[in-house]
Each structure stands twice: as structure tokens, then as C-alpha cells.
Image (tube, grey):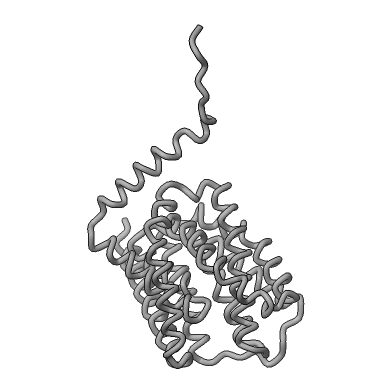
Amino acid sequence: MPRSRCRAPSSAVPVLPLLAEAASAWLARPPLLLGYVGVSILAAFVVRGFSGFGSSMIAVSALTLVLPPAHVVPAMFALEIAASVGLLPSVWRDVDWRSLVWIVGGCTVATPVGLAVLARAPENLMRALVSAVVVVVALVLLKGFVLRATPGPAATFAAGCLSGLLNGSTGLAGPPAVIFYFSSAGAAARGRASLIAFFVATDVFALLLARASGLLDAQAAVLALYALPFVALGIWLGHRRFIVTEPDTFRRVVLWILAGLGVAGLVLAAVRYSAAP
């Protein structure tokens, strides 16, 4: 009688071949494109290591110039989690848990709506939306936007809903949360710590939803794996620059870079729209 063989569940069988096929296709891309992706990720996470935010705004706006948003956004969820988890224990005591509950709650409610938009919207429209969000946020922060009073639960929840809509559809949960925490009264350490905790919670939730929705495919996974070394190096370099650079000067440079990338994305979207049949 032949021996029975133990086999993995059928759902797990195609995973490794799919990843291997996606990895081969990825490495077969032009070296210039691979270099552009690596440099973009590195620059984005240098900013993240310095300021505690900004990596998604830079990376998504840069990468969606050359890659489909449906691959970039889920990959960025995974990379943001990797960047945030290591920082969270050191800032745990500074987190503003009261506001975090409301803003994460709003983001949780609205993220599925954003994912539905990502799954159905035309690719060029998504590129334009990402770029427009980046330009607006960069200009708002460059103008020194400040909230005169600390927002209550309703306003905090609304900011979370806006974050969730952007998180699911463009991978940019950060802009409303950054404006909320860094334009409110309070210590910078509290705002930075709350943002780190916010990114862990919202990106874990969004990544699970993306996986359940079928958006986390082999191409997105390979992109995330390719980017991980650049993420680690960027975080390390950003922390070193934090020690020797004036924060206000560095942030203004970052915001101008963001605005430039956003404008470039809008121009590219307009060119592709005009060239479409």
C-alpha cells in the first residue's frame, strides 16, 4: 500500500511560485527604474527617520510616477509598519491616547471606503489624486497652518475619517493626522509619538483589509521586500541627520520636495489623460 504524503493546504501551494515569478519579473525591469525606486524609498525613509512622518507622502508620490498605485499602496502599508514598530516602545509614554482613540476610530471606519475606491478607480485618476493631496498638504504646512484650539472628539474623529479615506485609496493616511497633531497646542514629542502609534494601528488594519480584498498580491509583496534594505538604511541616516540638522530648515526642504513631486505627478497625469483615446 503506498504511503500517504503530507501536503500543504492547496491555498498555500501557489504562493512561492507566484512570488518567484513576480521577483523574476521585477528584477528584469530596467536598472534605471530599479535604481529610481531604491533612491525614492531611501529618501522617503531618511525623512521618516528624522521627523517621524512623511515617508508615504514622498514614496507614494514618487513611485506612482512609474508603478501602478495598486502595487505601491499595499507595499507602503507593510513598509510603514516595519518602520514604526521599532520606534513605538521608545515613545510609548508620550502618546496622546485620548485623541488617538478617536482619530484611529475614524480612520478604521473610512479605510474600507478608500480601498473600494482604489480597487475601482482608473489608474490615472489615482495618480492625479495622490499628487493633488501631496501638493495641498505641502502648501498648507509651508504656510504654517495652526489650530487655535485643541479639537474635540467629533473633530478628531472627522480627521480620522479623512485619514482613512486617503489611507485606503492612496496610502496617505498621514496628511490629516500630521496637520492635526503638529498644528495643535502641545509638545512636539507628544505629536511625534502619537503619529508613530497612529501609523502602526492604521497601517496594520489597512494591510489586513488589502489582503482580504486581494490587493496585496505578489507584485506588491516583491516591491516591499525589495524596498526593505532601503527603508532600514533611510531610517538610520535620518536619525543621524536629526542630531546635526536644524529641524525647521530640514522640514521646509522636505515640504518643497513634496510639492515638486506632487506637481510632477499632476503634469504626468494630465499628459496621459490628453494622450488617451
Residue 141: x %, y % from top left: 52, 86
Q: For the point 29% across and 66% down, which residue is it?
A: 36
Q: Quadrant of the C terminus?
A: bottom left
User: At x 54% / y 63%, what residue is drawn?
Assistant: 81
Residue drawn at 46 percent across, 58 percent down: 75
For residue 33, side relative to residue 67 (left or right) = left
**Picture quadrant where residue 204 is located:** bottom right
* Towards the viewer: 99 or 52: 52
Image location (x, y in percent) of residue 219: 40, 50
Residue shown at 43% from the left, 57% from the top: 224
In the image, 120 versus 15, the foreground residue is: 15
Residue 155: give x, y in percent of width and height. Answer: 72, 78
In this rendering, the count of numbered labels is 0
Residue that lies at the very extreme toward the top in this rendered image = 1
Query: Is 22 situated above or below 34?
Result: above
Question: In the visual, does 20 lie left or right of 173?
Answer: left
The answer to whether residue 66 is left or right of residue 119 is: left
Q: Residue furthest left?
A: 31
Q: Quadrant of residue 194?
A: bottom right
When the figure is inspected, residue 45 is found, relative to residue 222, above or below; the finding is below
- Image location (x, y in percent) of residue 263: 38, 77
Query: In the depicted view, which residue is nearer to us: 212 or 234?
Result: 234
